[in-house]
Amino acid sequence: MSRVLLLCPEPLAHGQPAGVGIRFIEFARALLADGHSVTILSADGGAVEGCSAAPILPHAIHDASATSDVAVIQGHVINEFVAHGTQIPLVVDLYDPWIVENLHYFEQRGRQVFLHDHATLLRSLRHGDYFLCASEAQRFFYLGMLAAVGRLNPLTYTENPSARGILAIAPFGVPPQRSAPPRNLETPALLFGGIYDWYEPIVAIEAVARARAHVPGLTLSFSRHPNASITPQSKAGEAERHVANKGYDAFVRFEGWTPYDARASFFDRFAAAILTFPRTIETDLAMRTRILDYLWAGLPVITSPGRGTDEIIRQHGAGVVVDSDDPAAFAEAIEGLLTDVDRLASMVAGASAFARDNQWSRVAAPLLDFCRNPRVDPAKSAFSTLGPSAAQATSPEGLVERLRRRLGGKS
């Protein structure tokens, strides 16, 4: 088997990973189970059991890549890998459409950050040998990009007309199935989770405020981001101010981020989950990590429409998709679920069925297959196109500055 190098842009040592960090932890576990040896470099050098680990620093990138057969990378770390890594087959994970997410932050971060993001994405598309995405919508989004930079070309088409030989779907998986306890309706609680600027938490807050008339004792919990300094928190601030101004403190809670390995018992406090967001291109492309994690925990989900997860929820009967941005419509959905014991139990069973069918060992199959036989794409530069200079992909932040921001301003 292969020596696999994972380069995770998120911190892992604090034990509170968000979506990208979770994905790399589970990639590492799946690769280990498949017989590979794994080294993981992360923003803070956090370890995964069974793996060698170190911080993402120039010398570590060079040394680890020199003794690896294949690298797996996500996000802006591509810039440092190209600068300091050795030339080995490279898997680029495009599951998180961060260039679209970061459009929400243009006002706070400005033009140079967007140009840096754009150049970084183009660099990823030019240097990768194999790409992963999370959904069919993402697949077509990225196929267009690959065509634009010359990576979807006559040679790749001849070798694999479906283009799955260069870009494969590897959605978000779940750990081994667990037996979720019955949902508690005596003191019903809903979980939203962390707040990013592409969500609409006030819709959920007002929906719960309305639903309390028919679901006595209903509460709603949000999670504070463990690395708040790396991501603007405009919507989180709006939500907290709204709760304070409306006097909703008695039933809306803002809690600390739960460690990844302790989240099952945390999820068991809740009857169901809720997630509200507007309809944007981010909605079309996103794979809502938390929704899949909630289903793994046996939590039915009440959610706004999203192309990445609607089909999953409907196929497994594991929640309610509310085709409205009106709090009243969400309140009705909450009441309909939490006042019907049989319906709730049926959706819990649907969530469990999803967990059974979406283990990481199956979801990560394209990655496992490539790592068993890693190779450089022989057509990588045959039809390459010119684009932003390398300088744009290494400014305005160098590695040290980016890691400092990732770690919350700590030096």
Image (tube, helix red, strand yellow):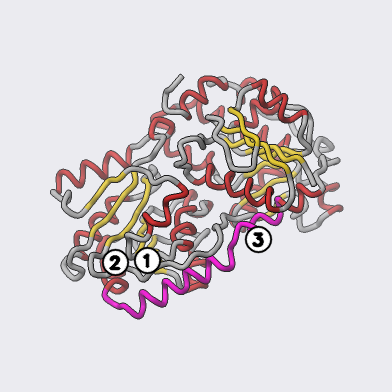
Badge 1 element: loop
Neighbours of disc 1 within 10 Å: few (<14), some (14-19), many (20+):
some
Earlier sequence position, callout 3 versus callout 2: 2
Q: Choose between 326 and 54: the one closer to the eye.
A: 54
Residue at 50% across / 61% down in the picture?
A: 309
Residue holding disc 3: 362
Residue holding disc 2: 329
**Quick check: is 153 in the magenta stretch?**
no
- Furthest toward the front, the residue is 50
Residue at 56% across / 20% down in the picture?
A: 398
- Camera sees residue 150: no
Q: Choose between 282 and 228: the one closer to the eye.
A: 228
Above or below: residue 353 compared with residue 68: below
Earlier sequence position, callout 2 versus callout 1: 1
The amino acid marked with disc number 2 is Ala
Residue at 82% across / 52% down in the picture?
A: 157
The amino acid marked with disc number 3 is Arg
Badge 3 element: helix
* In this picture, residue 68 sits left or right of residue 122: right
Q: Position of residue 27 (x, y in %)?
A: 63, 48
The amino acid marked with disc number 1 is Val
Q: Position of residue 183 (x, y in %)?
A: 34, 69
Q: CA distance from mark 1 to mark 3?
A: 30 Å
Residue at 33% across / 56% down in the picture?
A: 191
Magenta-highlighted residues: 339-367
Residue holding disc 1: 322
* In this picture, residue 194 sits left or right of residue 363: left
Do callouts 3 and 2 mark residues in contact (Cβ within 8 Å)? Answer: no
* In this picture, residue 408 sits left or right of residue 129: left
Q: Main secondary structure of the magenta part?
A: helix
